[in-house]
Image: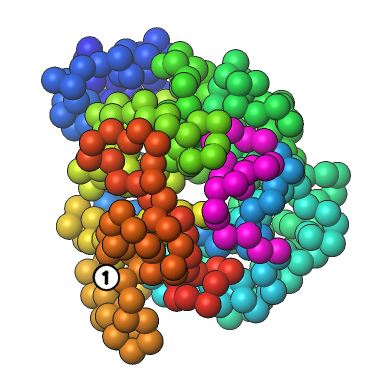
Amino acid sequence: MRFFEIAERACAGEPVTAEEALAVLGSTDDELMELVAATSRVRRHFFGNKVKINYLVNIKSGLCPEDCGYCSQRLGSETDVLKYPWLPAEEAKRQAEFGLSGGASRVCLVASGRGPSHRDVNKVSDMVSSIKESNPEVEVCACLGFLKDGQAERLKEAGVDAYNHNLNTAASHYPSITSTHTFDDRVDTVARARNAGMSPCCGLIVGMGETDEQIVEVVQSLQAVDSDSIPVNFLIPFDDTPLAGTYELTPQKSMRILCAVRLMCPDRELRIAGGREMHLRSWQPVSLHIANSLFLGDYLTVEGQTAEADLDMIVEGGFEIVGAEETAAQLRDRVRAHRTAHQAAIDPSPTSAQDAPSGGTLPCGKPEPVGAGAPAGVTIPVIRRRGAGTTEAPNA
Ligand code: SF4
C-alpha cells in the first residue's frame, strides 16, 4: 500500500476512505515503520511538535447501574475499585490543580452513572466555577453520562468547554458490549453537547472482540458526530467483568489502529488513553508521533505509568506541551523534583505500578490484582488507590 500517498492526501484535508483504512489495519508488521513514518507526517502537519496534556479527576466512582462489559464500575461489578460519591467542589478543584501543575491544559471531570440529575449538574457547575475561578485558562471537560433536556445548556453556561461521551465501539458491535443502553442513546448525547456549544470529546475502546471493519465503522461514526477530540482506549480486561481475560491486541496492531484513526480524522485531537501502557508497551513513545494528546498519570480506576514517565516520553520525543509557559524539559524536571521531595517527606512507601511489590500485597494493604491469562510481557495495571477519593497524593 502507498502509505505516503494517502498521508499526503490526509495532509490536504482528505481523510482516507474506509477501504484504505481497512488496508492500513490489515497491513503487516514488516510495513509498520513505513506506515508510522507516513502517518507521522499528518500529525506534524496539523499539530507540529505539540502534545496536549489532559488530566482525569474521577469525581464519583463506582456503583453504576449500567452494564458496560468493559467497565470496572459496572452494575454488580466485584472489581475492587475505589467507590465514593460526588467529591466536594473544593476537593475536585484540589485534585484538578495537581494535574494543572503537571502540565495539563484540560481537566476532565468524570462521574460514573447513567446520567446526572439536575442537582448533580448543579454540583458539577460548582466544581467548574471553583476550578476556573483560580485557573481561568483551563479547559474543563465533563463526562457525566447521558444528558437530559436542558442539561447540556446548563453545563455550557457553567463554563464547561467540552463534553466527553465515547461511542466506544461500532453500532453493529454495541449490543454484545452493553444491554442497558443503545448506540443511538450515545449518539444523542454527543449531539446534545455539540448543539449546546460544548466541544464533543468522543472516542472508542479497541480490543473488545470487534473486527477491523467494526473499527472503521465506529471511526466513521466519530466522523459523523464531528468529534473534536478522540480518545483511543485499549481494553483493560478487568477481572470480574465479562471481558476479563480478553487480550487481543499486540503493540503493532495498536499502532495500526492509531494510524487508521489519524488518517481517517487527520486534523482531530487524537489521544492515547486508558490501557496504552499495557498494549502499546515499548511503542508508546513512538505512538506520540501519531497521537498528539494523552492523559497524564492515572486513569479513573487504575493507575497509569508515573507522570514523570509521561513527561519523559514528551521530552525525549522532542515535543513541547500545549499551553505551557516553560519547556517540556523544565516542566518535567520541576515535577520530578516536587514528586521526589513529596515522596521523601510524607509518603515513603512505593506507590506506582512499577514500584508495587509483585505477587503479594499493595502499599495500601490490598492484595495485588492478578490478570486472567495475561500474555507474557503484559503488565497488569494496579487498581487506583491514590488521588481523588483518597488521602494519598495523586500521580500528577
Ligand atoms: S462506562 Fe460509564 S455508564 Fe458504563 S458501566 Fe462504566 S461508569 Fe457506568
Is residue 68 magenta-colored? Answer: yes
Q: Position of residue 342 (x, y in %)?
A: 34, 84
Question: What residue sits 62% from the left and 44% below the top?
Answer: 77
User: Viewer-proximal residue, 94 or 43?
Assistant: 94
Q: Image quadrant for the N terminus?
A: top left
For disc 1, the neighbor class at 10 Å (few under 14, some 14 to 19, many from 20) is many
- Can you tell which quarter of the image residue 192 is in? top right
Any part of residue 93 in sight? yes
Three-letter residue code for mark 1: Arg
Left or right of 85? Residue 96 is left
Magenta-highlighted residues:
67-85
Q: Which residue is mark 1?
A: 332
Residue 209: percent from left, percent from top: 47, 21
The C terminus sits in image quarter: bottom left
Picture colour scheme? rainbow
Image coordinates of residue 339 in percent, x first then y, are: 32, 78
Q: Is residue 223 visible?
A: no
Q: Is residue 377 above or below residue 248?
A: below
Q: Residue at x 32, y 81 (%)?
A: 348
Q: Quadrant of ligand 1?
A: top right
Q: Position of residue 323 (x, y in %)?
A: 40, 65
| Magenta stretch encompasses residue 60 | no
